Image: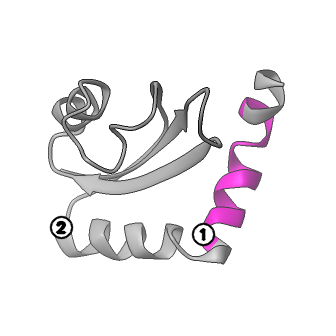
Amino acid sequence: MYYTYVLLCKSDKLDEDLYIGFTSDLRERVKMHKAKKVKTTSKFDEVTLVYYEACLNKQDAQKRELQLKTGFGRGFLKRRLENYFAELV
């Protein structure tokens, strides 16, 4: 399996951000993000897995990652996670 995933990244010093990626080992990849072993997310104090999708094909997962990184994809995520984000406020 291959996973496209979304992390909510928070920090006292930086604006909240969504990180979108793909991996074949979701649990290990999230552990790496939380251990600050991924340069892109290491500057954030808190990293939380908020969404993922599973694919049987690596190219399909990569394609979905690219789709979610577009403006339309980020809009989809905000609508899809609307209730989750409302609980955070």
Span shown in magenta: 73-84
Q: Residues within 10 Å of mark 1 (few under 14, many from 20)?
A: some
User: Which residue sits at x=29%, y=71%?
Assistant: 62
User: Which residue sits at x=30%, y=65%?
Assistant: 61
The amino acid sitting under disc 2 is Lys
User: Which residue sits at x=50%, y=70%?
Assistant: 69
Q: Nearer the viewer, residue 58 or 15?
A: 15
Q: Is 72 in the magenta?
A: no
Q: Residues within 10 Å of mark 2 (few under 14, many from 20)?
A: some
The image position of residue 87, as x and y in percent, is 80, 23
User: Which colour scheme appears in the figure?
Assistant: one colour
The image position of residue 1, as x and y in percent, is 18, 50
Label 1, secondary structure: give it: helix
Q: Is residue 61 above or below residue 44?
A: below
The answer for how far apart the CA atoms under marks 2 and 1 are is 19 Å
Residue placed under numbered mark 1 in the picture: 73
The amino acid sitting under disc 1 is Gly
- Give the left or right position of residue 88, taking residue 61 as reference: right
The image quadrant that residue 2 belongs to is bottom left
The image position of residue 34, as x and y in percent, is 31, 26
- Viewer-nearest of discs 2 and 1: 1
Q: Nearer the viewer, residue 18 or 52?
A: 18
The image position of residue 85, as x and y in percent, is 75, 34
Q: Nearer the viewer, residue 8 or 73?
A: 8
The image quadrant that residue 64 belongs to is bottom left
Q: Which image quadrant: the C terminus?
A: top right
Label 2, secondary structure: give it: helix
Mark 2 or mark 1: whose residue is earlier in sequence: 2
Residue placed under numbered mark 2 in the picture: 58
